[in-house]
Structure formats: structure tokens, C-alpha cells
Amino acid sequence: MRYFSLSKAFMAILSRDLLLALRRRSEVVNPLLFFVIVVTLFPLAISPSQAVLQTLAPGIIWVAALLSTLLSLERMFRSDFEDGSLEQLLLSPCPPTVVVLAKVLAHWLVSGLPLLLIAPLLGVFLALPTAAIPTLLFTLALGTPVLSLVGAIGVALTVGLRRGGALLSLLVLPLYLPVLIFAANAVAASADGLAVTGQLYFLGGLLLLSCSLAPLAAAAALKISIH
Amino acid sequence: MWYWLHRFSSPAYFYRFAGKAIPWLAAITGLLLLAGLYGGLVLAPADYQQGDSYRIIFIHVPSAWMSLFIYMVMATAGGIGLIWHIKLAEVIAASSAPIGASFTFIALATGSLWGKPMWGTWWVWDARLTSELILLFLYFGVIALQSAGEDKRTASRASAILALVGVINIPIIHFSVEWWNTLHQGATVSKMDAPSIHTSMLVPLLIMAVACKFYYATSLLMRARAELLDREHNSHWIRDALKNHE
């Protein structure tokens, strides 16, 4: 039997997924554009007044981040499921939790990290005070990995179904609520000049919890979906 | 006991047993409902502050209790089905979901009916109301996933995982909603639970709670029987059972 290394397997899956994402750039860029466009809709729909936008900004940015993550979630397992490579990955000696973790990390690097990079611009759009922008970045850095991890469970459950898209949002959005509450609240509090360490600790806790449990659930779900 | 458990989990035995138990359970449910409603709506005195409108708690509170209880039953049965591959546990989980969702809906609807005269509005973003609403969404997710797959057993196993994920999330969601609410608005909304409740109100309330449990058991067995017929329609015992009109 050949020597098998977990970290090598992890890196191999990660680099494969990143390479695939690089080859299909439009799939990566579209959720990001969606994020920007949804945020621009709100000033047009509600009011361009700075005071109004400032109070709404944390919520708008976070809801838009949630929706854009939802758009890109399916990509995590769908194409691999359709061409059969997911089955091969699960048959390989690599534990399924490691496969899930590598795929989640790739998903976050491709769809979560760009949100983080473009968020300051959107903060400026929505008249978010400059002092709140670092907090916005912190919450996105801690929160979007949770979205990818919890989302992986939802995708793993629906990947075998033909029309999983709408179902996916029904399954995943209620589970996203704690992240939304703490993150949007932290940004709003820091815009008012309040301390936000409590909220950030909570987000960090959610990240650790989902990092340890979500891969297990997603791996079990994948096994059922592939069946 | 293991022998008994093993025998009980066989679909054929369960089908016959449930058929015999349903009339008894239904009778107990009816009696308890009558007693509880009479005690609550007629015997219990009117509240000195809320008048007669508080009486909705005799339906509202048991439903709210049931909504969580059934979710736990559903998740436990789902977990048992996942681990030991027991068909009956999957059937129980699948049959519980719509009943639990109905109780959650009743709790929300009666709460909102009560809120109109008491709080002056149909809906407030109170922590409890919000987490109950989210519980309803979780139920919808389980039901949707249950009905999405072509293969019933795969769908059952998938929705069991979802229900278990929900069990971990319910406390987190509940506390984050509570925390969010206390930050946004102070204690403007009066909490429903008074420090103490008079015996004349407590007794009917408890009777109603037990009646709801029995109602759940009755309708669970009926639904599970129907579900078994659907899932096992090719097996021999069904043909035998139908021949004997059980």
C-alpha cells in the first residue's frame, strides 16, 4: 500500500477546485456582481438620504452577502456530482470530512474572500461611517466561512435532487440567522461607536463550532445523496 | 425488553398494534380535550387584568410546548433511523413533521390573535415569537426535503440529518434572537409568564397539555400507518393485513 498523507490529499483537492474556479471565471464573478447590484438596489428603492442608509447599511450588506453566498453554494458539489468525480473522491482513502473541508475552503476563497475585498466600497456607497468599516471586514472574515460551512450541509443534502436550488435556500437560510444577527449587530454597534468584542467572540465561536461539526454532517449527507 | 423492542420495530407488528391502539388513544384524547376545555373556558375564573382573552393560553401554551417536543421526537427518531437503519423510525420521523408544523402554526396564530387585544398589534418581533417562526421554517425545510426525493428512504435519511443539524441550531438561534431583541428594544413587551399561576387555571392547562400529547400520539399512529402502507405496498404482510381488514 502506498503512503497516504492527509495534508497532501487536502492540498490536492484544494488546488484542483481553485484551478477549476480559475477556468470558469464567470461563475466566480457573477455572485460578486450580484452582491454589488443587490446593494445598489436599496438606495434606489428606499431613499438616498445618508441618515436612512447609514442605519440600514449593516443589514443590507449582510443580507446581500447571505444571498450571494447562496447563489454560489451549489457550485461546491454539483458539477463534481454530475461528472462522477465526487463519487471517486468519496471512494478514495481520504476521509470524507477532509474532502468536505478542502472543498469548503476552496469555496470560501473563491466566493467569500472577494466579498470581503469589495465590502469597503459598498460601505462607502451606503454612507457607513469609516470607523465601522474595519468591523464590517472582521464580521465578514469570521462570518462568511460559517456560511460556506453550513451551506455545505445544505448542498450535500440536495445535490442528488434535480431541482435543489429553491429547496437549498429553504434549508440553509434559517441556519444562517445567528451569523446574520451577530454580524449585522456588530457593524451597527460600531457605527454608533460602541464596543463590539462580544459579537465578534460569538462569531468566532460559531466559526469554531461549525468548523468542527459541519464537515461531519456534510460528509454524512454526501454519503446519503450519492447512495 | 430488547426482544420486545425488536418485535415492535417490525412494520407488520407495528401496523397491527397501531390499528388496535388508535381507537383507545382517540377516546382518551377526546375526553381530555373535553375536560381541559370545560375547565379552561368555563370553570377557570377570568383574569383580573386580561379578562377572558387570556383563555387562549389553554390552546396556545400546549401548542408551543408540543412544537418543540415533536421536533425533538422527530430528530430522535431520525437519528435512530440513521444509525440502526430501522424503517419504522424513519416512518415516525416523516409522520411527525407535518403534525409538529401544524402545532407550531397554531401556536403562532393563537399568539397573534392574543397579541392584538393585549399588545395592540398582530405581530411583534419578540424573541419567542421570532424563534417560534424560525422553528416553523425549520419544519418546512424538513418537510420539503422529505418530499423532494424520489426514493423515500433516501429522503428520510437526508431529512433526518437536517433535523439533527436543526437540533444543534435551535438553542443557538433562540439565544441569538433573544440577545438581538434585548439589544434592539428594552422590555417594552410584557412577558407572558406571570410569576405564578392560579391552580384553577393551571389544572386545565396541564390537562390540555396532556390532551395534546395524546392527540399527537393518535394522529402520529394514523399517519405512520398510512405512510407504512405507502412505503411497503409491495410486501406480503400488507396483503395479509388488508385481507383480514385490519
Image (cartoon, rainbow, N blue to C red):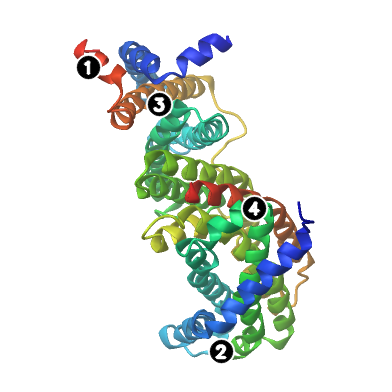
Calculate the distance from the C-alpha at mark 1 to the C-alpha at mark 4: 45 Å
Amino acid type at mark 4: Pro
Q: Secondary structure at mark 2?
A: helix
Amino acid type at mark 1: Leu
Earlier sequence position, callout 3 versus callout 1: 3
Q: Is residue B49 toward the left or the right of residue B233 in the image?
A: right
Earlier sequence position, callout 4 versus callout 2: 2
Amino acid type at mark 3: Tyr
Subunit under mark 2:
A
The label on residue A96 is 4
Q: Secondary structure at mark 3?
A: helix
Residue indicated by mark 2: A50
Query: A76 or A3: nearer the eye?
Result: A3
Calculate the distance from the C-alpha at mark 3 to the C-alpha at mark 4: 38 Å
Pinpoint residue B191: horizontal percent, then vertical percent: 57, 44
Local crowd size for mark 1, using a 10 Å CA cut-off: few (<14), some (14–19), many (≥20)? few
Residue at 38% of width from left, 33% of height from top?
Answer: B95
Subunit under mark 1:
B
Residue indicated by mark 3: B216
Subunit under mark 3:
B
Calculate the distance from the C-alpha at mark 2 to the C-alpha at mark 1: 71 Å
Q: Are marks 2 and 1 in contact (CB under 8 Å)?
A: no
Pinpoint residue A177: horizontal percent, then vertical percent: 57, 59
Pinpoint residue B33: horizontal percent, then vertical percent: 36, 20
The label on residue B242 is 1
